[in-house]
């Protein structure tokens, strides 16, 4: 059996996944749901989809978002940045 600590993961993901008691299948399902949701996913919806408690889903979502943020912060954007199929929500508000 392949241990996660032997895998070639970055420090952010290694710390998030190794210290958890949840199975990897739940983590990978949560990663998929969070990254593929166009308008975001609530922790309650994540809880329902993965079958874990709402508290565990909230913590999992926070850890995944923090790991993604840490990874993105280490990369600088260069050249032209294009956005495809983005959701820029909200309605225009009138300033009085």
Image: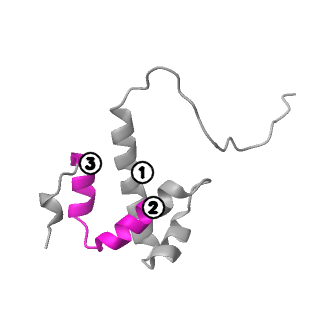
Residue placed most toward the observer, 18 or 82: 82
> In the image, which residues are magenta?
10-31
Residue under pointer 2:
32
Dot 3, crowdedness within 10 Å: few (<14), some or many (≥20)? some
Residue drawn at (64%, 43%), measured in percent from left and top? 85
Q: Is residue 65 left or right of residue 38?
A: left
Which of disc 2 and disc 1 is earlier in sequence? 2
When asked about the image quadrant of residue 25, the answer is bottom left
The residue that disc 3 covers is: 12
| Crowd tier of the residue under label 1, counting other residues whose Cα lies within 10 Å: few below 14, some 14–19, many 20 or above | some
**Marked residue nearer the N-terminal end (3 or 2):** 3
Q: In the depicted view, which residue is nearer to us: 7 or 46? A: 7
The image shows residue 84 at horizontal and vertical percentages of 61, 39
Of circles 1 and 2, which is in front?
2
Choose mark 3 or mark 2, whichever is in front: 2
Q: Secondary structure at mark 1?
A: helix
User: What residue do we see at 29% from left, 74% from top?
Assistant: 23
Q: Position of residue 43 (x, y in %)?
A: 51, 65
- Relative height, residue 17 to residue 78 (above, below): below
Could you tell me how far apart the alpha carbons at marks 3 and 2 are, in whole angstroms?
17 Å
Residue 84 magenta: no
Counting residues from the start of the chain, the first of labels 1 and 3 encountered is 3
The part of the image, by quadrant, that contains residue 30 is bottom left
């Amino acid at each position: 059996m392949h241990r996660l600590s032997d895998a070639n993961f970055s420090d952010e993901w290694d710390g998030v996944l190794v210290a958890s008691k949840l199975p990897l299948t739940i983590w990978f399902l949560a990663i998929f749901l969070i990254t593929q949701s166009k308008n975001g996913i609530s922790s309650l919806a994540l809880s329902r989809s993965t079958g874990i408690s709402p508290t565990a889903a909230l913590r999992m979502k926070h850890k995944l978002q923090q790991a993604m943020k840490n990874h993105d912060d280490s990369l600088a954007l260069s050249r032209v940045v294009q956005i495809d199929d983005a959701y820029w929500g909200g309605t225009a508000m009138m300033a009085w």
